[in-house]
Amino acid sequence: MRLSKFKQNPFVKKVGFNRIILFCVMILMYVAFCLLVPGFFGKARILSVMNYVYFLGFLSLGVTFVIATGGIDFSIGPVMFCCALISGYTMVFKGAPVIVSIIMSIIIGFIFGSLNGYLVSYWTIPPFIVSMASMNIAKGVAAVYTKTQSVSWPLSTDPDNGWFRNLVSYNGFPVGLVIFLVAAAICMIVLNNTKPGRYILCLGSNEEAVRLSGVDTKKWKMLAYVICGTLVGIAAIFFVGAYTTVQPGYGDQYNNEAIAGCVMGGTSMVGGLASIGGTVIGVLIISLLQEGILALGFAKDIQLIVTGLIVIVVVYADVMARRRKN
């Protein structure tokens, strides 16, 4: 009875009961790691978590739009690496200014997003097939362009190009977190308060009904993938801003983490329901989890196992919730 009354509270209804629970889980997880790992409360650990949040956050924001349509994109990680490799190689080995490389990264992400969206929307190829093909294309293009070389972006000490690292951190202040939250707020407005956002959500609920009402469903579905690709291009900048070096052939591991953060936050895998605020909290949990597992002395592989289990659990919970609703 008390729980039902709590759910009816105006503040709870506005914020969302599930998001409040998710936020409490994140706080409890942080407290648990602080108790288990000496020094986990320190600034260095927090900044390490934030470094992961930046790029994973943009990946998750992008894939939220795609999943909202009922689609999926497993190419976001490799495409992010492709953006970072090609734009970084152009800067390091061909002398392009860093601002040109940043713009190039975003454009490459936009191109992949447009390609995925066009194939899914206008050629009606299943999103799973398109994203798997796009993943391999991204790896291949990056490897060919860079001649399979790894690329290291300039350090903050570089007098000409090091300034881009201020987008991630400036004198220890997490500038990247501010940029990410502003981007999340914009995505929230677009998804919930604009015509494109409403159409994207409606596509996930009942695409055929939307089409019969006279809406150009192909255009709006493609837009979701374009937004995703553009945000992936931005994610690449924050990845190299935090971790410097990128190697060809990698990126797959971030697909599940981005999707897990998105779905954990309340975005339904069958589309029609999405929460940008929930995605932000989900990303924070995934980032905190990977840092905590490493701090406890476990290998990265354990974090991958835990992330995979989280995906299974949250998708199962989503399926059961929809069954009860129906």
Image (cartoon, rainbow, N blue to C red):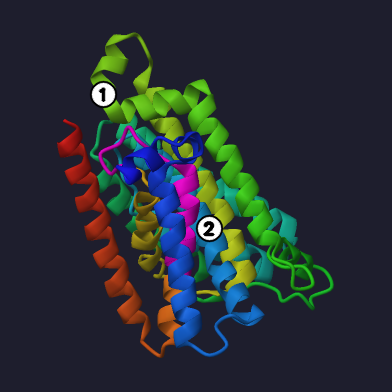
Mark 1 crowd level (few <14, some 14–19, many ≥20, 10 Å Cα):
some
The answer to which image quadrant residue 17 occupies is: top left
Residue 112 at least partly seen:
no
Q: Nearer the viewer, mark 1 or mark 2?
A: 1
Question: Where's residue 248, x and y in %?
Answer: 44, 71
To which quarter of the image does residue 217 belong?
top left
Using the image, determine if residue 163 lies above or below residue 152. Answer: above
Per the rendering, the mark at residue 83 is 2
Q: Residue at x 48, y 43 (%)?
A: 276
SS label for mark 2: helix
Look at the numbered disc 1 and give the secondary structure of its residue. helix
> Residues under labels 1 and 2: Cα distance?
34 Å
- In the picture shown, does residue 13 fall above or below 17? above
Q: Residue at x 27, y 10 (%)?
A: 212
Q: Which quarter of the rendered picture does the N terminus lie within? A: top left
Identified at 45% across, 37% down, the residue is 9
160 or 26: which is nearer to us?
Answer: 26
Sequence-earlier tag: 1 or 2: 2
Residue extending furthest toward the front: 1
Q: Is residue 277 visible?
A: yes
Foreground of the two, 62 or 283: 283
Please give the name of the residue rendered at 32% of the width and 80% of the height, measured from the top-left corner: 301
Residue 135 percent location from the top left of the image: 35, 56
**Amino acid type at image mark 1:** Asn
Q: Is residue 170 magenta?
A: no
Q: Amino acid at mark 2?
A: Cys
> 48 left or right of 37?
right
Residue indicated by mark 1? 206
Boundaries of the magenta span:
268-288
Classify the position of the C terminus by image quarter.
Answer: top left
Judging depth in this view, the residue of 129 and 86 nearest the camera is 129
Q: Residue furthest right?
A: 159
